[in-house]
Image (tube, helix red, strand yellow):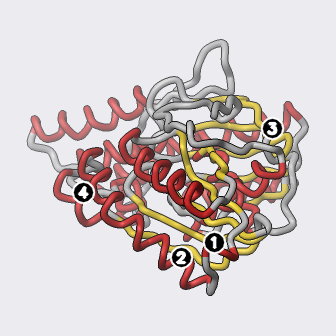
Amino acid sequence: MKILAIESSCDETAAAVVENGRKVLSNVIASQVESHIIYGGVVPEIASRMHAEAISGVVKEALDRAGVTLDDIDALGVTYAPGLIGALLVGVNFAKGLSYACGKPLIPTHHLRSHIAANYITSPDLEPPFLCLVVSGGHSHIVAVKDYTDFKIIGKTRDDAAGECMDKVARTLGLDYPGGVNLDRVSKNGDPLSYKFPRPRVEGSKYDLSFSGLKTAVINTVHNAAQKGEEISVPNLGASCINCVTECLVSNTIEAAEEYGYKKIALAGGVSANSVLRRKMTEICAEKGFELFMPELSLCGDNAAMVGAQAYYEYLSGNIAGPELNAYATMPIDNIIT
């Protein structure tokens, strides 16, 4: 089964053709990073307009690279939640129009489910059940993947996401957008123990996460040093911040896996590309005997191949939408509304 997938939840206009949920025939991404750098982050209105300008050409290129036409496509998958509402609407409305015009089924696909599904492409033998740490600029979740379309949230952030924390710290340090990527880059040779920051825990919910206090502590350190005329070591402070964030993510995930009896652990989302997180998770999983799955780096960020992978399993479960499909800025991973 060949699915033409569309992703436009933030600042990447993407389309892909994926066969049977695992084989990527094409994966095209039009990035908007250069347009948002001058603002230090994504400007929703600009992102929406750029999606509208790019989406037709991106979809055509995805079909061309896959060597197929719309006649060869069995269904259309599209990200409809969560994300920037204007950006999502561009993809959803384009997919609805295309579905109507060519008479193909329309599969509404959840963005976080798709990030998890990126692992099915990198690791074709991976099957549920497993525990997945989903971390990005807007989301931090520990999710029990019971089946391809059956999810349970074990823990999640109560405030800032891990990626948001690192992005804001990077911006305070004067690093360009995307902040988390650049913070990881400049911190490679930094001392992760040079600055002492809090490791927040959520009382009464041991697997939930919280990063707003850590973010504030790091930013205050920078501002206080500036007021006193003291120099901040960007590599050391960045490494210390990343160390705190990843310690929280890794420890909560491992504790949850041990309590709930999961032997397979996966990473997903943009922050799953972070080198420290990948190294720490690899080391502790090897030490404790867990099997670890991580998307290849090209599939960690937003892309349409992951949407096509998850859309295949949504289709098999009967999750088909009609022309009334809408986009949603927020939606839990375990509660699908069409």
SS under mark 2: helix
The residue singled out by tag 2 in the image is 62
> In the image, is residue 58 above or below residue 119?
below
Question: Label 3: few (<14), some or many (≥20) within 10 Å?
Answer: some
Q: Amino acid at mark 3?
A: Asp
| Coordinates of residue 292 in the picture (x, y in percent) | 78, 58
SS under mark 4: helix
- Is 79 or 203 nearer to us in this picture? 79
Between marks 3 and 2, how big is the CA–CA gap?
A: 29 Å
| Coordinates of residue 23 in the picture (x, y in percent) | 74, 74
Between marks 2 and 4, how big is the CA–CA gap?
A: 24 Å
The residue singled out by tag 4 in the image is 36
The residue singled out by tag 1 in the image is 17
Residue drawn at the location 90% of the way across and 37% of the way down: 261
- In front of the other: label 1 or label 4? 1
Q: Are marks 3 and 2 in contact (CB under 8 Å)?
A: no
Relative to 135, 72 lies left or right? right
The residue singled out by tag 3 in the image is 150
- In front of the other: label 3 or label 1? 1
> In the image, is residue 298 above or below residue 104?
below
For the question of whether residue 275 can be seen, the reply is no
| Coordinates of residue 206 in the picture (x, y in percent) | 68, 22
Question: Label 1: few (<14), some or many (≥20) within 10 Å?
Answer: many
Relative to 6, 280 lies left or right? right
Residue drawn at the location 68% of the way across and 70% of the way down: 73
User: Which quarter of the rendered picture does the C terminus lie within?
Assistant: top right
